[in-house]
Every structure is written in structure tokens, then in C-alpha cells.
Amino acid sequence: MSPKPTIHFFEITPDEHRYFQHTLKNHTVTFTDQPLNIESAELAKNADIISIYVTSRVEKKILELLPKLKLITCRSTGYDNVDLATIRHQQVLLSNVPGYGEDTVAEYTFMLMLALSRRLLPALEQARSGHMDHSTLTGFNLAGKTLGVIGTGAIGKHVVRIANGFGMKVLAYDPFPNQGLEYEYNMQYVKIIELLSQSDIVTLHAPYMAENHHMINKNAFDRMKPTALLINTARGELIDTQALVVALASQQLGGAALDVIEGEKLLELNEETELLKKTTDRGFNYVLEQLILEKLPNVIITPHNAFNSYEALEWIRHTTVDNIGSFVAGQPKNLVK
């Protein structure tokens, strides 16, 4: 690798632009605020390294436009937007930012949990309107309730820790249990069927992969308490959104707080014409489902913002520069195997 590789950043913010321009000043670096797609790939045709974020797509037809590419560095932990088989075939390496938002996302999870359980949004609406009716704002305590944590990795384990501070009973499911957590905290690993049926609140912290697609579906909602709350700060595709809409509308579920939603990459398209050009029948269903969810009084939706703290963003930037520097030095770090 040349000591001065060409690097192109996609989906860059002004703060990131300033940071990377300064820290990588000895390299040839270019930037765009666009995600990587078939149209924007031309911008990186001479790049040895590209850096992407979550709305970029890396697939065969795009890689064919990047003949010099040797490294993709994700400014995120997740990399389900990258076709791993294709990049391996092309001998392109992939690095990510593991563990940048454990506390950040765990704390956000509890913010959503409290906002939903204590009916924060209708309380704010009533305060602003000047028409208060406390009888419609009654919530419930977290203390003494059962929290079901699906996924006890880097983020899930911090959710368990915080739940103990609230005095909650914690049930957890993970195909790879961290037995040390059971010794350190008041929690118990159980089968997912038991977790769903016993939990007052279920929170998702599993990675998205093919075997996890729609792991929370109609069968799952059939097992949950009708008063239960569902929190998702992981990946939207973990939930069958159509089944969620039905469960909420039929009062089979008490409420949901979603920082991620199925098909959100499509929902981020700003122009109606772009939406029409790129949307399939299933895509239109995503849009319709979100419109329905937004109108339900027992739903909170935030725009994939759980990661967004100063501390997490600083760690992402630092690790991205480290990933690039170590690759150039011939000792790449944080590679996705």
C-alpha cells in the first residue's frame, strides 16, 4: 500500500469533514455527503480506501466501478449494508468500529422505555396545549417489572446493568450466553419463548443477519402480554413491521418505541420522485406502515439516533482514522472476518 493512498469519504457531515481533513492531512482525501450508490460511485473511482456509513450500499455492480479499492472502513459497528461474499471475492478488506456506543445506546434505550411507560409525549402535548388531564397520563414504574433483553453483547450487557439500577427483574436470551453476567447482575438466561411471555418490556439488542430476520413476528406477539412494551434500538428488520402494526392497532401489545424501522433506508429518500423511482411494492408497504405507526398514540419513533452522543461520535472518528492508519502500515485492525 502506498504511504499516501487515495481515500474517499461518503455520507460525511461538516464536523466529520473538518476532523478527517485535519487528521488525514498527509493523505489524498476527498469527501461527499452522499451515500455510496451506483450514481455516486464515480466519485471514488480512483480510491484505494473508502469510508461509508449506514445508508451506503456495497454490492457487486458498485464494486465493479471501484477497480483500485483495497479497504472499506465502516463508520459503524453494523455492516449488513455490505455484500461480504462479493468483497471477499474481490479481495477487498472491511473494517468497522466495534463497541463505540455501548453506554450511549443503552442509555437511549431507557430514555425510550421511560418515555413510553410514563406517557411522556402525550404529557408534553397537554402541557403545550394548556389542557391537562392527568387521568389520561397514568404510567407505570420500572421498579419491580420484568425486562426481557434479547441480545447480551456489548450494548445488551449495559442494558442489563442499568436495569438492575432500576430494580427490574431481568430475563435474557442470547444464543451465545455470557454466563458472567448472571454472576455479576440480577438476571437469568431463558428460552426466547419464556422471555416473551413473562416480560413487561422487551428490548432488542441483537445484530441483524439472515437468521434473525423478523425474529419478532406474529408468533412472538401472540406470546407477549397485551400490556407489554417493545423497544428497538438495534435493527428495524428484526421486527415484522406489518405484524407489529396489527398487534398495536388491535391492542395485542401495549406500545412500542422504535429508533430503527424496517426499510428505513428507503424512508430516508427526501424527494417524492426518488421514492417513486426506487420503491418496490414492499417498499410502499414500508412507507404505509410507518405512516400508520406515527398515528398510533402508543408508539414513539425516533430517527435512528440512539448512537448520537458526542462521546460515541468522537470514538467513531478516532477508530476510523486508526483503522485507516493501521491498514496503510500493513497491520490492519478491526477487520470483519
Image (cartoon, rainbow, N blue to C red):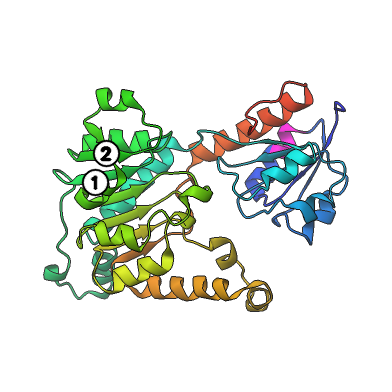
Identify the residue shown where x is 82% and y is 41%: 69
298 magenta-colored: no
Question: Percent position (x, y) of residue 117?
Answer: 23, 56
Left or right of 217 on screen, residue 275: right
Q: CA distance from mark 2 to mark 1?
A: 6 Å
Which amino acid type corresponds to the residue marked 1 in the rendered image? Glu
Question: Percent position (x, y) of residue 138?
Answer: 14, 63
Return the mark for residue 194: 1
Placement of the C terminus among the 4 image quadrants: top right
Q: Nearer the viewer, residue 101 or 238?
A: 238
The residue tagged 2 is 190
Q: Secondary structure at mark 1?
A: helix
Return the mark for residue 317: none
Left or right of 134 on screen, residue 85: right
Q: Nearer the viewer, residue 19 or 110?
A: 110
Q: Nearer the viewer, residue 114 or 330?
A: 330
Left or right of 255 on screen, residue 244: right
Left or right of 39 on screen, residue 33: left
Which amino acid type corresponds to the residue marked 2 in the rendered image? Val
Q: Which portion, as a residue range, is magenta?
A: 20-24
Identify the residue shown where x is 82% and y is 49%: 44
Q: Quadrant of residue 36?
A: bottom right
Q: Nearer the viewer, residue 330 or 137?
A: 330
Q: Quadrant of residue 8?
A: top right
**Looking at the magenta stretch, what is its main secondary structure?**
helix
**Marks 1 and 2: in contact by CB < 8 Å?**
yes
Question: Percent position (x, y) of residue 145?
Answer: 16, 46
Identify the residue shown where x is 23% and y is 65%: 123
